[in-house]
Every structure is written in C-alpha cells, then in structure tokens.
Image (tube, helix red, strand yellow):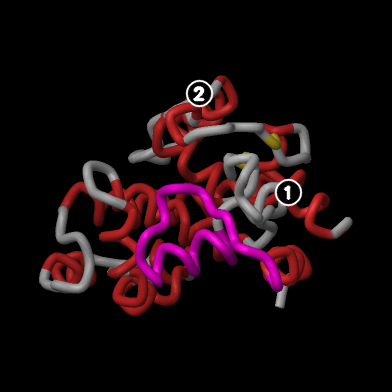
Amino acid sequence: MDAEIKKRIAAGKGTAIMRCHWPKSDLSIAYHDHEWGVPLHDDRKFFEYLILDGAQAGLSWETILRKREAYRRAFAQFSPISVARFNANDRQRLLSDAGIVRNRLKIDSAIRNADAFLKVQKEFGSFDAYVWRFVNGMPIVNHRRKSSDIPARSKESDVLSKDLKSRGFNFVGTTICYAFMQAAGLVNDHLVSCFCHPDMKHETSLR
C-alpha cells in the first residue's frame, strides 16, 4: 500500500472523520480517501485518469466510478500500447459495450490519446516526467474552506490543456485537465477541514 494512503488511513483512525462534501456513496468515499489528491507517479494510472476524465464530460463522476471496472476490461486494463492498437472492430466492440459510456467521440478520443500518450513517453521518458513539469515537480496544495471555493480551472490547467492539444490529445479542455490534476495529486483541493488535507493530517498526528 502506498505510504501516502497509509498516512490518510492513520489520520482518520480514532477520530471523527471529516471529509470533503462531495463523496456520498461507498464508492466515492473510498475513491476520495485513497486516491483523489494522492500524488501520482504511475503512467498507466495517468492514462486511466485521462480516459475516465474525458469520459466524464457532461456526466457525474459517480457515474464514471460505477463504470470503472467495465472500462478496465474494455480498455485493456488501461494499457496505452494496447489501446493505441485498437482497430475498427475494437471501436465497434466498445460502441456495443453497455458497461461504458457509448459515445463515439469519446471512444475515438481515448484511442487517439493512447497514441499521443506513447509519443509523450518517448519524448520525455515517461508521462510522469512530462506532466509534473506543469506544477514545477511539486503538488499545489490549496486551502479551500468550502466546495464553492474550488475553481473549475486554473492557469496551470490552461497551460496543460493547450500543450496536450498541441500534441494531438483531445477531450482535454482546461476543465477536464483541472479535474485530472486534482485526481492525480498535482493539485490538492481537499478542504482544509478534510482529514486528507496535509494540514489536517499534521494536526491529527500531534494529538
């Protein structure tokens, strides 16, 4: 288990756990507690988040979480090498898969993005090395007090979106990129009252 996740679990033990306001179901609570905002350095996971955040456009994140296992099966466990090789038969298979969002543009985007993802890996050595450049290698830790304080975009997501588009990615508008950065821990937007926020974890460790 990742050390950051262990810290989060330890921070919540023996205390009344305070979380951000958005996770409501067991599925979204588990995602919030163990994934959202944890600094990510795994390329396959980055690719997964790119596909899922692109699929979310116009839908709720809860909807995508419920379809996540189906996406893993449909998209070769999020292997960009495998997805980049998908052909017309694979596209038709995906359009017939009721477990995922059957939107032709989003499906075509995922395949196209796989090819662009591989090119980034080739140029930079890894997608990890590429994407962390946009936050100077360190997570941006915000101090939001309420959900309405959290923006839909930032100057960093604007720059990331523009660069990804120039490299052939699509479904990577700045709003999608900001959600991606939150998910992958490039940005920490946990509320200051949430046990996953770094400041709250520090206070808990002193009790």
Residue at 66% across, 33% down = 142
Q: Is 197 inside the magenta-drawn segment?
A: no
Quadrant in the picture for the C terminus: bottom right
- Could you tell whether 92 is left or right of 90 in the image? left
| Residue range (magenta) | 13-35
| Predominant SS along the magenta part | loop
Q: Secondary structure at mark 2?
A: helix
- Determine the residue located farthest toward the top in the rendered image: 155
Specify the quadrant of the image occupied by residue 87: bottom left
Q: Is residue 104 visible?
A: yes
Question: Foreground residue, 26 or 69?
Answer: 26
- C-beta proximity under 8 Å, tags 1 and 2: no
Label drawn at residue 200: 1
Question: Identity of the amino acid at label 2?
Answer: Asp
Callout 1: few (<14), some (14-19), or many (20+) C-alpha neighbours within 10 Å?
A: some
Query: Closer to the camera, 119 or 190?
Result: 190
Name the residue type under label 1: Met
Q: Is residue 21 magenta?
A: yes
Residue carrying label 2:
158
Vertical arrangement, residue 38 with respect to residue 187, above or below: below
Of labels 1 and 2, earlier in sequence is 2
User: Which residue is located at x 51 percent, y 59 percent?
Assistant: 32
Q: Is residue 26 above or below residue 201?
A: below
Query: In the drawing, does residue 53 fall left or right of residue 95?
Result: right
Residue 33, given in percent of the width and then of the height, sits at 57, 63
For the point 67% across and 51% down, which residue is it? 128
